Image: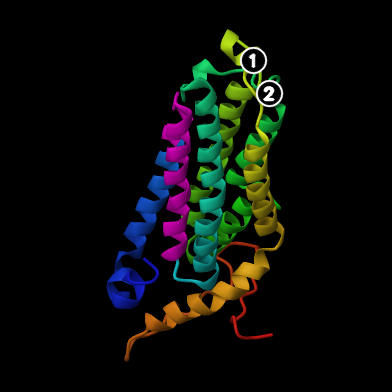
Amino acid sequence: MMRFCLPLFPGMSRKAAPYIAVFAIIGVIYGALVALVQPNLKKLVAYSSVSHLGFVVLGIFTFGVIGMQGAIYQMLAHGISTGALFLLCGMLYDRRHTYEISEYGGLATPMPRLSAFFLFVTLSSLGLPILNGFVGEYLILLGTYVANWKWATWAALGVILSACYLLWAYQRVFFGEVTVEKNRTLPDASARERGILFAMAVITLWMGVGSTYLTRRTATATDTIRQQMVRPGDVVPQEAARPAENSSVKISLERSGTR
């Protein structure tokens, strides 16, 4: 969308932006609600991916530096956190050959290391501060608020719902009593699995605390795309240098080339 849709069709992109933003918000909330009622762990993670990518589309079609930077960052963070969740689901499947949440329960006792890694990645996916999921969602919501505070309000429901379905799924899988006898003797994460998960955990934490390393490098690309959207004779809409109407929030926007 950012590389081809916006530069090639800037006029139509701006005209369609309100409709695309509404569909993106619907995708955020719908994906979260479907994930909330999923009895299958892998499908739950898949629908959470639909919800998170709705944030990406919303950030792109704010056409602002903050929102588009957040969309890029969210795509990178999503690849790490959701990829790690699918990897962890695969490790559980390798042991029990099922994704049904009802077949698990109480796994924190026989598998403490795997449950700790699963919790860490779950928290990153739901947007806990200092982890990678927070940065992208925060920038997208901030950029959306500058463009339209109503969109930001509705999109924020997706953040709340993500905490609901992810933490509830974690509770059902790892906490409580062991109800299936096979689960009592499940092996914990092996050395190979711990090495893979540790590497992904380090990247997740680094992206959360060192976000400027990436945002500085994507700022030029974002500016270039915004400049490519301008055609001769166009009235260029300036990114808001003040918050939405009737708000006390102060937002400072700087051009990417200034010091």
Colour setting: rainbow
Label drawn at residue 108: 2
| Secondary structure state at the residue bearing disc 1 | helix
Q: Residues within 10 Å of mark 2 (few under 14, many from 20)?
A: some
Q: Nearer the viewer, mark 1 or mark 2?
A: 1
State the residue at coordinates (47%, 54%).
55
On the question of residue 86 being in view, the answer is yes
Quarter of the image where one finds residue 231: bottom left
Out of 11 and 181, give the one closest to the viewer: 181
Label drawn at residue 222: none
Out of 158 and 201, give the one closest to the viewer: 201
Quadrant the C terminus occupies: bottom right
* Residue type for callout 2: Ala
* Residue type for callout 1: Thr
Q: Position of residue 258 (x, y in %)?
A: 64, 86
State the residue at coordinates (62%, 79%).
254
Label drawn at residue 185: 1
Q: Which region shows up in magenta? A: 33-61
Q: Residues within 10 Å of mark 1 (few under 14, many from 20)?
A: few
Residue 51 forms part of the magenta stretch: yes
| Secondary structure state at the residue bearing disc 2 | loop
Looking at the image, residue 233 lies above or below residue 204: below
Quarter of the image where one finds residue 85: top right
Residue 107 forms part of the magenta stretch: no
Quadrant the N terminus occupies: bottom left
Q: Position of residue 237 (x, y in %)?
A: 43, 79
Q: Position of residue 46 (x, y in %)?
A: 43, 39
State the residue at coordinates (66%, 49%).
199
State the residue at coordinates (53%, 67%).
69
